[in-house]
Amino acid sequence: MKFQYLVGIASVFFLAGCTTMPRGDNADLIIHNGQVLTINTEMEVIDDGVVVVKDDTIIAVGGHELMQQYQAQKVIDAHDGIIMPGMVNAHNHLPMIAFRGLGEEGISNRLFAYFFPLEAQKLSRDLIYNATKLGAIELAQSGVTTYADMYYHMDEMAKATKEVGLRAVLGETVIKFPVVDAKTPYGGVEYGKKFVEEYKGDALITPAYAPHAIYTVSKEKLQEIHALSEQQDVPVLIHVGEFPNEEKRLEGETQAKTPIEYLSEIGVLDQRLVIAHGIHLTPNDQKLLKEADVGIAYNPMANAKGATGIAPAWEMYRADMRIGLGTDGPMSSNQVDLVKTLSYAANMQRLKYSDRTIMIPEQVIEMATLGGAKALHMEDQIGSLEVGKKADIAIFETQSANMMPNYNPYATLVYQANPSNIDTTIVNGKVIMENRVMQTVKLDDIRDNVDAFEADIAEFAKELAKKAIKSKSLMD
Amino acid sequence: MKFQYLVGIASVFFLAGCTTMPRGDNADLIIHNGQVLTINTEMEVIDDGVVVVKDDTIIAVGGHELMQQYQAQKVIDAHDGIIMPGMVNAHNHLPMIAFRGLGEEGISNRLFAYFFPLEAQKLSRDLIYNATKLGAIELAQSGVTTYADMYYHMDEMAKATKEVGLRAVLGETVIKFPVVDAKTPYGGVEYGKKFVEEYKGDALITPAYAPHAIYTVSKEKLQEIHALSEQQDVPVLIHVGEFPNEEKRLEGETQAKTPIEYLSEIGVLDQRLVIAHGIHLTPNDQKLLKEADVGIAYNPMANAKGATGIAPAWEMYRADMRIGLGTDGPMSSNQVDLVKTLSYAANMQRLKYSDRTIMIPEQVIEMATLGGAKALHMEDQIGSLEVGKKADIAIFETQSANMMPNYNPYATLVYQANPSNIDTTIVNGKVIMENRVMQTVKLDDIRDNVDAFEADIAEFAKELAKKAIKSKSLMD
């Protein structure tokens, strides 16, 4: 740990020691009395640190002396907790939270027995709106301040996300068959265009396109989306390398031996692209991804649960690539918090490379914050506690039994912490949870809606269960 | 899910509907208004279920109608939560909680740089007592009601464990060099004998012997311990198959090709033995373990973190062997709760066998409860909610965002739940935590002691860090 102190921006009215003079509020929010993990280039840790916020921006990060330089109406005492950048969940399908827990009985045809009928029959605008709110509360309660999502009716998701107060990159799904919000194949392109126009420039929402995968979106449509993303300057989110040999499922001709080579061949591999999973990547794929400055969302827990494998995340992290952490959707990992994902991020790499010295806690926390910001190409705005960045901040308490002792804050977070240890979550300078109490949307506000969709879906699921095939697993 | 109701034992005074007559307290504790996971042979789930306790024993489990048959001073409303058997953490070194978080910076010589000096210099009786209390609180707060441990000064551990109110199998370590509580090689045998005599027959503590491993305890001492365990009828806990080729590190002659074959060869493989890890087991080893009725503690999270591998737990579970879940010590997994371990239990097996349909949530919960009881040869007393068993019970609330929806309670517990969702923990009929408030030892009672050992160890660790060698990992 380093104890060098950062110097905040020049303070306009430095009145330290002059307690009798009235001092103006030169800041909006001050957080103090905690261990600040800056995640800056030097990975500085500031004991008894202070973070000062004005409007939506961090204006100073440093030691206790900043308390003399800044004044604000709102002062948060971190009570010796850990103050860190809000976490970035780089891959999700948040509204699927409405379906989580279904089809968990060892079903071999889960995609057809559950996913498809649920998405075809139950994805109303209302459901997407209410499920997003539930999911966004879970995200906020676990210290996630930004998430990236690929789903449908992204305007409903945007509305719910803004009400809860999170930052998000929301990609409207484009896929070759009709879906709930697009009655014609590839209707997501048109839906997406309107959505991008509506939300471009929003303080919290970054609209995006989300072509599903190379085997469900044609070459022409991938190129059309690429052109649109250039024109409108928005991200493109896509699943790549989740399954082996995805390129073999392509309909057209290709010389490419891998999905990444294919994306390169058709000219869409660029700095606006974010790929989810990346389990099956050759060294050449990794090189292409690095050269094109593509973002990668590593989903260690979902990929283990789904038995899809372990991405070469350590190699990409060490190659200084844009790699962040995701949970995948709640039908894949059944939870959306990154806290539980932290230990998976390390432990899966250690198993993969048979090396217990790699992916140390400090690296995991960097991946969960700045890494996610880089994966989404947002590191100029978020991912660290540095002057000029947006004020997206999570505070962990360290008073609970599981947080004791706290010798190494990174290890405490990665291995000891639970989501419930998140005390306070701040997004864009706004306190959206404080002392575990949501300040924006409260769970009780939406409980009736959740109960209603749960009852409706539970009823529908009884029918689905009849079509589910219990797996003949390897062991039978 | 099955909704068949269990019939409790014959009620002596059935006075349903007769509200004016005084009714005697024919029970001590009634838990109602929750979904009861019985973990009985039929894996029955009782919606709106009731569990009735008298003294330390479950006397009825069934549906809402039991509320008419039983009366008790203490009635706990589970508020639509999940009522399940307390979990069993089948492998631990709990006092190492005092050291957790140290040596997490990618150290290649962690054993020599941290473990050994910490254990040699810092393991006072006081530390073991206070650290056990801290750990036992974390266990209770996460729904663990029984744990098995291999460590030193087990009388201190027993004292602290009983004060917190947990059930435990405590094995005094036997090892070939002098240790903190035994100044001569194998001094743990004598220490253990006294400890066994002192605690044999205790309501909560099952004393045991804990020879460290086959390569740190001689054949003669393993046989001596085996004879003692037969004579005193107590368990023997040992690490086996944590590393490859442990048999090659044996000093004496052997025909055995594996550690399990060796244990069989020297005549100590029996129904009192509990092996921890079992990562490296041949099919023949598994056969020998099953024939000898040996218990196995599977530690999926610690084994992933330590990059030691994935035990063939699914094969052993399917072979109906005595396999339970453990966390290993807090310098290995950094936490002692089983809630975070649940998803690892499933996900590691799915990765190992490349099959996402195996180790379904219902099986994981069985492993975390009855499986652990079987591993410790205690299934006649604990592990399920059935009439005649000890009242060891955990109640999860289902009102938090992360617990919604709750279509399948097993999936909710394995993938959605956090330790903080545990509301109430009951051991041997005694409520040790209620509504998240500890009823026995409170964290605040020991906070000063924890702060003191943390400060002392943090100071000492600065010296240790100087001897630590940052790893040249595979990737360097």
Image (cartoon, coloured by chain):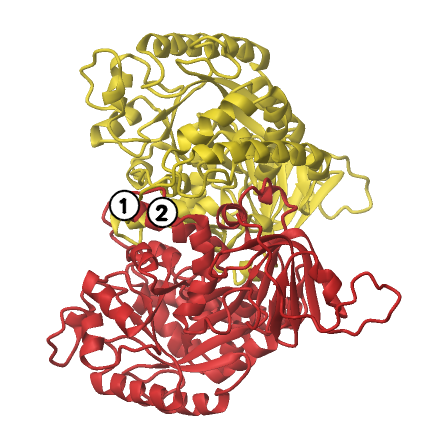
Chain colours: A yellow, B red
- What amino acid type is highlighted by mark number 1? Leu
The percent coordinates of residue B110 (x first, y second) are 32, 63
- Quick check: marks 2 and 1 in contact, CB under 8 Å? yes
Residue carrying label 2: B358
Q: Chain of mark 1?
A: A
Residue A11 visible in the current orientation:
no
Relative placement, left or right, of A414 versus A95 is left
B84, above or below A15, in the image: below
Relative placement, left or right, of B425 versus A3 is right
Residue placed farthest to the right in the image?
A: B20
Relative placement, left or right, of B270 versus A126 is left
Closest to the observer: B161 or A265?
Answer: B161
Local crowd size for mark 1, using a 10 Å CA cut-off: few (<14), some (14–19), many (≥20): few
Which residue shows up at 33% across the image and 7% down it? A220
Q: Chain of mark 2?
A: B
Residue B158 visible in the current orientation:
yes
Residue carrying label 1: A474
Which residue shows up at 39% across the image and 44% down it? A345
* The image quarter in which residue B393 lies: bottom right
Relative placement, left or right, of B40 versus B264 is right
Closest to the observer: B107 or A144?
Answer: A144
Using the image, tell me which numbered label, if any, was put on residue A390: none
